């Protein structure tokens, strides 16, 4: 049995230590906002926060989480940076198909929490690991800038 702090709630799960956090979240805890994309940490769809840092949950074994706090897309809006990012996402109308957007929002929120006034280069570097098949990259950058201005 593994005890996890997910979105401020304690969850005890029966998972093998090498089970990726993504599958613990989706299949055992039933938080399905975090998406499976590639399974090799290249697309960013599975991004969650571990003590505020953006991590790829598809390759992170649950045993590596320890007592760190996990935040998923379901709760990121409760943080100041998450509120700004989600509001900016709506105002800029970023989403097209939406599949990658939970990972995009999680990565953008971690960026804004660490750097409240990111440059284009900062945004490009932080978001480089997130793939959007619809190509909404210009709107993503615009939304991050909008959020940084206090959306």
Image: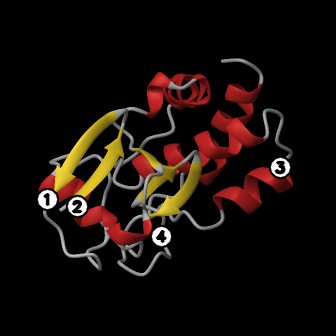
Residue at the spot x=86%, y=45% of the render? 119
Query: Cβ–Cβ below 8 Å for labels 2 and 1?
Result: yes
Q: Position of residue 129 (x, y in %)?
A: 59, 67
Upstream in the sequence, badge 3 or badge 4? Answer: 4
Mark 3 neighbour class, 10 Å CA radius: few under 14, some 14 to 19, many 20 or more: few
Left or right, residue 30 beside residue 43: left
Query: Which residue has dot 4 on it?
Result: 43
Query: Which residue has dot 3 on it?
Result: 120
Q: Nearer the viewer, residue 63 or 97?
A: 63
User: In the rendered view, would you say 108 is above or below 149?
Assistant: below
The quadrant holding residue 130 is bottom right
Query: Which residue has dot 2 on it?
Result: 24
Residue at the spot x=74%, y=42% of the render? 114
The quadrant holding residue 148 is top right
Upstream in the sequence, badge 4 or badge 1? Answer: 1
Secondary structure state at the residue bearing disc 4: loop
Q: CA distance from mark 3 to mark 2?
A: 35 Å
Q: Nearer the viewer, mark 3 or mark 2?
A: 2
């Amino acid at each position: 049995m593994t005890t996890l702090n997910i979105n401020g709630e304690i969850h005890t799960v029966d998972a093998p230590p090498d089970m990726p956090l993504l599958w613990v979240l989706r299949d055992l805890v039933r938080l399905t906002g975090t998406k499976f994309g590639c399974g090799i940490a290249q697309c960013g769809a599975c991004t969650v926060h571990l003590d505020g840092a953006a991590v790829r949950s598809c390759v992170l074994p649950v045993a590596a989480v320890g007592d760190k706090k996990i935040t998923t897309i379901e709760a990121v809006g409760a943080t100041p940076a998450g509120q700004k990012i989600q509001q900016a996402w709506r105002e800029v109308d970023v989403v097209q198909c939406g599949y990658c957007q939970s990972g995009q929002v999680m990565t953008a929120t971690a960026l804004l929490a660490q750097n409240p006034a990111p440059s284009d280069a900062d945004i490009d570097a932080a978001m480089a690991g997130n793939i959007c098949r619809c190509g909404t990259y210009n709107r993503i950058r615009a939304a991050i800038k909008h959020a940084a201005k206090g959306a």
